[in-house]
Image: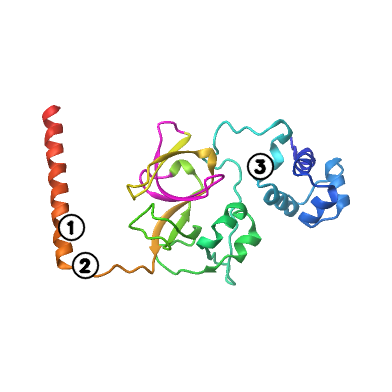
Amino acid sequence: MSYLNDNIKYLRKQKGFTQSEFAERIGIKRSLIGAYEEHRAEPKIETIQKMSYLFNLSLDALINRNLGRGMDASLPDSEGRTLRVLPIVVDRDNREMISIVPVQARAGYMHSYSDPEYIQDLPKFNLPLTELYPDKSYRIFQIEGDSMLPVTPGSYVICEYTENWDHMKQGEGYMLITKTNGILFKRVWEDDKNDHLLLKSDNPEHEPFDLSKKELVEVWKSLGLITFDMPEEQKPEEKKTDDLVSAINQLQEDVKKLKDRAES
């Protein structure tokens, strides 16, 4: 059973749109909105997609859920059972291009990540590297802040789209697009509760924190970096200090292992 016609009317009223305003936003005649809401006609797939973008809902939710009675938000959609819209851009040879989300576009991306026109307007290019496969989708995010040092602010992180959030690898770095926490670049660990993630920074000054999977809207696995922050030459005395610190840390780790063995 499809709830599409009822959902169109319910969502339009929830947004406070008149039929004319709603029709103008999705580029159709006002009379068609009335026909949809009165069950006299069904919208074309292109129109349904525009509604999906406008209301920030999956096509599955728009068609198959009775939104007037509330959506079942008890569990996160980790496996992607509902359709997630991932707009992409292709070149003249129909090869998918890599879109770039610079720092100044992060706020806009939060609201328009599923809008094809917005993604089309982002900077984009082809990156012919053997590490990137033609059957996968990639995106580049520029980072800000120092939470993932030594990855410096302003660096560009090359990421691969992750459809199934249950396939995230423990301790790997991910770019997480969230509903209320912005864009997060963190190492991801499964929390004790299987519907939560424990997010950690590489910079120890930033405390780990929990994030519900229901907060996620997109997940991208980090693969590599593009940076223009070249390291400075290390002085001999600095190298000696670093070697000494490394030796002390290794000694402490060896002592801890011996102590653990003795106690067991």
Lower sequence index among marks 1 and 3: 3
> In the drawing, what numbered circle is on residue 177?
none
The Cα atoms of the two marked residues, 1 and 3, are separated by 55 Å
The quadrant the C terminus occupies is: top left
Relative to 236, say whether 10 is above or below: above
Q: Does the CB distance between marks 1 and 2 fall below 8 Å?
A: yes
Q: Mark 2 points at which residue?
A: 234
The quadrant the N terminus occupies is: top right
Which residue corresponds to the image point at 60% horizontal and 61% vertical from the top-left? 119
- Element at badge 1? helix
Lower sequence index among marks 1 and 2: 2
Q: Does the CB distance between marks 2 and 3 fall below 8 Å?
A: no
Which residue corresponds to the image point at 77% horizontal and 43% vertical from the top-left? 8
- Left or right of 153 in this view: 8: right
- Residue 171 magenta: yes
Q: Does the CB distance between marks 1 and 3 fall below 8 Å?
A: no
> In the drawing, what numbered circle is on residue 60?
3
- Element at badge 2? loop
Which residue corresponds to the image point at 87% horizontal and 45% vertical from the top-left? 34
Q: Name the residue under label 1.
A: 242
Relative to 183, say whether 157 is above or below: below
The Cα atoms of the two marked residues, 2 and 3, are separated by 56 Å
User: Please, what is the three-letter code of the amino acid marked with disc 3?
Assistant: Asp
Residue 137 location (% of width, % of height): 51, 58
Residue 203 location (% of width, % of height): 34, 50
Residue 59 location (% of width, % of height): 67, 45
The Cα atoms of the two marked residues, 1 and 2, are separated by 10 Å
Relative to the observer, which residue lies in front, 135 or 216? 216
- Element at badge 3? helix
* Span colored in magenta: 168-194
